[in-house]
């Protein structure tokens, strides 16, 4: 990105960002396009949460009190990546975050991050934008950043960036859970970026261009694509199905539950630290599903493990997906309809001191595993106010007792402090460096 | 699938298949649904090639003269898998192909392959359908089968299925090309199935359920997801961009070129063998793109390598994407505008004895490679009448001279004989066993 584009991007309001409209270029031509103004009005209207659940092409506002991509109605595709810093200079870290923020504001608005073709840049330099999203709409792209524990104190105990005393108490190292089989190469990372979009090429383009901007300062630690959302974060969305074939996320936190979001999702003033107020903590888990084994399990066993009907998604003994779960109900055989160790019981707030999570995970299939099995599962992403009271105790209980464990393996893990939203003229995590 | 469903699936015409409508179940209930009839009319209208380019939800006809998924306007998502047979019994192979054909006819019509929930099957048995596509539309799913060289004679020289003398002369073992760096685990396979759909979950569901039907007879050799098409096979489609940021497939064979398709794509009577007439040969190549290196290359060099402008997709020296390439034109510096070793020149029919290919490849990103680079590229899929006259000489020339080779690596490979389309009552490749 050229210097004056960065300037414009940061001085203007969120709705007047610079950069080149990817769609404006298509069909238009000439001088007006080269200025980066033409075609802008066509998709500068940021959609509302309600329309976002159905309009899959428009932009989602980047600036705001909270980062986009958390309560935003879950988009259909994911490209998640974590980065390790190769620099140890605090100034270079800050500079990277500034560049990333300016680029993220442009890309999420459906704009290229600079020239990708001769019409508006020098042909002797590499293109500023890699170009594969030219012609594609904003497609509800959101980019959400989180800071890993190693950004504060790395594995060797080094305080590389003078941030050790800014580490939030809630950003703990996750404990070992029973059955964890974590691959270090798919875990951790100094910084995580979650790209969600209704178009996978738009999400891939975003992560690739952020990685490119980070050349010399960061390198990609790992990267994960997800092809199908497994949760809804809005009542305007239907509940999707995971690779066990079950509806997933029926009782997820929804953006319409504003009071609950303050209670369960957003870091409050009383929680501290100041730089995290309005942010949230993200726990990521790559959960391999043994789908071939699952597929040989009887329907009644599958339903017993989950605690819901496969077809309807209704709690066992109920008719409708959204019926309240009756944990006391017994069948004619005297057995609990929802078993003691059923997944819905162990994960339910009423058995977890009221703890809830905002989940927005994705199905993945990453080829096969050399044993003739699909390397498939759920890339679990959960946002919350305090992992010590939410993810950790819930997962401890699940790891201990959930009968679903026979069919899943946790093979990757991460925990990240996601700062509050960016205001115009600011950058991702600015308050962390004040 | 139950026996009577198989019966129905094979005895009925293509437009009257049995199975359970995935969408009919949603919102509907009760006896009518359990019969597998309700909701059928809603999406039984098979779309025309023209509407297929814009309607991303409808079904594509499974039965016909040619297999679907070849000239079908390229869908947005891919799940490609190859299978190795674990049986050596010819009868079991035939039985597998029959079961797969019946299932494919159902799934491509947007139907489950059997019960997935208690309402229409015994709860003590595993569900017949894995269920993750329940509620999703047919999404233009096509399933296309091909037979690898090892089905005829395996690596040890064994004629496991009595098919050695039925092997087409055109189904050669691909030669080694300069620069090939093939991973055997991502190459070959007795049988390939290409699932294309506008919804990735629909494509994944299809491959998974075919794999499941094959338990005990086959195992997955490898599996590849692709997220963005890199070619068009219809003039009704725009030209998409590959991960080099360039429009790809401008001069691809299109379904509208019917005479050319007979000449370049479909196996003719005079070619033989009889069982392949109306079929085509598929060459698959997993082509890793060194995108980080590419992204550091100047725009003029990128355009020189490809031979086209990055923004417009026009041949160098021309204004419009579809302008004819002028291979003689020189610039004011006296140099050829399209260099001697530019990709578009080396791959062009006029420098390859008129050979063309019907390409329908996909972009992929499979995480990162442990060196901080995205494991990204193009999963190349090309259909043709005779690889000896088409893919092989073209690729030999490209491997020798293409300046793009500095930025790509061929890391996986396959060649498959794709039989003609299935008629009602028949099954994939039936004539091979007559």
Image (cartoon, coloured by chain):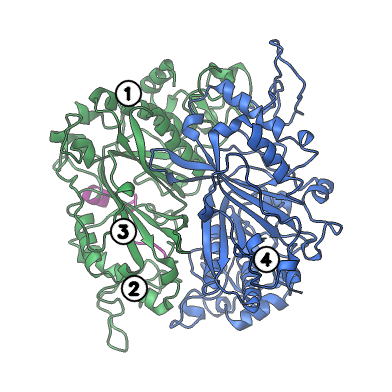
Chain colours: A green, B blue
Which of the two residues, A310 or B5, is positioned nearer the viewer here?
B5
How far apart marks 1 and 4 lie (CA) works out to: 66 Å
Residue B291 - label: none
Q: Is residue B215 left or right of residue B347?
A: left
The residue carrying mark 2 is A305
Q: Residues within 10 Å of mark 2 (few under 14, many from 20)?
A: many
Count of numbered circles on the image: 4
Asked if labels 3 and 1 share a chain, the reply is yes
Which mark is nearer the camera, 3 or 1? 3
Q: Residue furthest front?
A: B156
Provide the secondary structure element on which disc 1 rests.
Answer: loop
Up/down of B372 relative to A257, above or below: above
The residue carrying mark 1 is A425
Provide the secondary structure element on which disc 2 rests.
Answer: helix
The part of the chain drawn in magenta is: A246-264
Camera sees residue B28: no
Q: Are marks 3 and 4 in contact (CB under 8 Å)?
A: no
Q: Residue at x 76, y 58 (%)?
A: B169
The residue carrying mark 3 is A410
Camera sees residue A15: yes
Which comes sooner in the sequence, label 3 or label 1?
Answer: 3
Q: Is residue B284 left or right of residue A375?
A: right
How far apart marks 4 and 2 lie (CA) works out to: 44 Å
Which mark is nearer the camera, 2 or 1? 2
Place residue B43 in its image quadrant.
bottom right
Q: Is residue A86 magenta?
A: no
Q: Is residue A252 magenta?
A: yes
Q: Is residue A66 left or right of residue A28?
A: left
Which comes sooner in the sequence, label 2 or label 3?
Answer: 2
Q: Residue furthest top?
A: B332
């Amino acid at each position: 990105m050229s210097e004056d584009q960065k300037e414009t991007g940061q001085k203007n309001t969120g709705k007047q960002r610079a950069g080149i409209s990817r769609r404006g270029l298509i069909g238009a031509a000439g001088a007006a396009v080269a200025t980066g103004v033409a075609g802008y009005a066509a998709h500068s209207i940021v959609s509302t949460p309600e329309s976002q659940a159905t309009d899959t092409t428009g932009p989602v506002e980047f600036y705001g009190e909270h980062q986009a991509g958390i309560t935003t109605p879950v988009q259909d595709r994911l490209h998640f990546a974590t980065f390790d810093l190769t620099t140890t200079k605090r100034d270079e870290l800050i500079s990277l975050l500034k560049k990333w923020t300016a680029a993220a504001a442009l890309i999420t608005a459906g704009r290229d991050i600079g020239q990708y073709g001769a019409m508006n840049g020098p042909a002797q330099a590499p293109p500023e934008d890699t170009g594969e999203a030219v012609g594609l709409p904003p497609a509800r792209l959101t980019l959400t950043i989180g800071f890993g524990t190693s950004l504060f104190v790395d594995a060797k105990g080094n305080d590389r960036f003078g941030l050790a005393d800014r580490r939030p108490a809630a950003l703990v190292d996750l404990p070992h859970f029973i059955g964890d089989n974590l691959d270090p190469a798919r875990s951790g990372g100094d910084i995580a970026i979650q790209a969600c979009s209704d178009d996978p090429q738009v999400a891939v383009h975003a992560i690739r261009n952020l990685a490119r901007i980070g050349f010399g300062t960061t390198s990609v630690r790992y990267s994960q694509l997800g092809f199908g959302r497994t949760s809804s974060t809005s009542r305007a969305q239907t509940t999707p199905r995971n690779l066990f074939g079950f509806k997933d996320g029926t009782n997820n936190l929804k953006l319409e539950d504003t009071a609950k979001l303050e209670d369960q999702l957003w870091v409050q003033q009383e929680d501290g630290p100041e730089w995290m107020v309005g942010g949230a903590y993200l726990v990521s888990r790559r959960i391999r599903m043994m789908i071939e084994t699952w597929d040989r399990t009887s329907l009644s066993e599958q339903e017993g493990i989950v605690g819901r009907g496969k077809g309807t998604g209704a709690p066992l003994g109920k008719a409708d997906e959204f019926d309240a779960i009756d944990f006391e109900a017994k069948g004619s055989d005297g057995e609990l309809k929802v078993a003691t160790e059923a997944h819905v019981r162990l994960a339910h707030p009423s058995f977890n001191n009221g703890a809830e999570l905002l989940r927005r995970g994705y199905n993945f299939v990453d080829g096969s595993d050399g044993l003739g099995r699909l390397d498939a599962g759920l890339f679990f992403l959960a946002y919350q106010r305090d992992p010590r009271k939410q993810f950790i105790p819930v997962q401890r209980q699940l790891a201990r007792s959930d009968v679903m464990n026979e069919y899943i393996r946790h093979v990757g893990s991460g925990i990240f402090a996601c700062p509050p939203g960016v205001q115009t003229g600011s950058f991702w995590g600015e308050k962390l460096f004040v």
